[in-house]
Image (tube, helix red, strand yellow):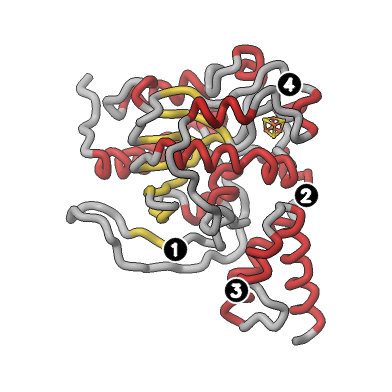
Amino acid sequence: MDSAKRARAEAWLKYGNDLGLGPYFRNRTPLDASPAVESTLTPSFEMAARTKSAANSRSAPAAAPSPKASSAPSSMVGASLPVISSAPGPTLFEAAERKVGETLDDIRADLGECTRCRLHKTRNKIVFGVGNPKAELVFVGEGPGHDEDVQGEPFVGRAGKLLTQMIEAMSLRREDVYICNVVKCRPPENRLPEKDEIATCSPFLLRQLDAIQPKVICCLGACAAQTMLATAQGISKFRGEWFDFRGSKLIATYHPAYLLRNPPAKSEVWKDLQKVMAVLGLQPKKR
Ligand code: SF4
């Protein structure tokens, strides 16, 4: 193995260890990685190398490394339904055990007044998640902002109002779906969550998703999408594609906060939501 390849493989393992997933990463990327393995390694290494400067592009579609094309056949029934792709990177969660019979209340009780990562020092309230515990559709955002931190509920600020409008346009009510975030405490100054914060908090998100077992998970923004799919690809490269995620269909779209800054992108998001509606058998709300 040449030195550049070895350096990338070692960085990959360090990244996995930082996330507490060292053995899993080691199995996926042995140091004598084949070229095929290396092609999955590179994007995630780039994710690991992401710097704080990315905080300025919070939830916006970022410039991306070259995408890994995928054309796996769909396992979904229905002529108009889209193809399901392989994840752009190896998903962090695919090897995690599923806890059978756990409820959202169990998970909330286990979380407690969490001090597992540094974000607890500056938060007001833990924002666990809200909505239907048997929802067919779960929205996953990045993390609480100011309003959410004050109220203890996700997506209640301006972006949250827009999300509610999006949900209602899908002929659903907010209480029909479940809404949560990658991290449950507000990052100071609304910065991006750090990778160790994500690694500490996201297992609770995984348990929530396992408890709900939704038909569809919709990632809102780059942070949620890149975390769930373990990729550094810009969200614009895979937005609107379907992925398998532990028995659920996962799709990523832009964050409502991004839409507030870039209203023309609403039409793209609406196309993504229409794909979700097709899977859930929903008709657009009549005006
Ligand atoms: Fe705990 Fe998550 Fe809050 Fe960190 S962000 S303190 S892991 S609840």
- Badge 2 amino acid: Thr
Q: Is residue 67 left or right of residue 2?
A: left
Residue 123, disc: 4
**Location of mark 3 (residue):** 39
SS at mark 1 in the image = loop
Say which of 31 and 158 sits in front. 31
**Quadrant showing the N terminus:** bottom right
Q: Quadrant of the C terminus?
A: top left
Which of marks 1 and 3 precedes in the sequence?
Answer: 3
Q: What whole-number distance in Å separates the C-alpha atoms at marks 3 and 2?
A: 21 Å
Ligand 1: image quarter: top right
Mark 4 lies on a secondary structure that is: loop
Q: Whole-Å distance between the Cαs marked 1 and 2?
A: 26 Å
Distance Cα–Cα, label 4 vs label 3: 39 Å
Nearer the N terminus, badge 4 or badge 3? 3
List the residue tagged with mark 1: 86
Circles 4 and 3 in contact, beta carbons < 8 Å:
no
130, 68: nearer the viewer = 130
In the displayed structure, 109 sits above or below 205; it is above
Looking at mark 1, is its residue's CB closer than 8 Å to ligand 1? Answer: no
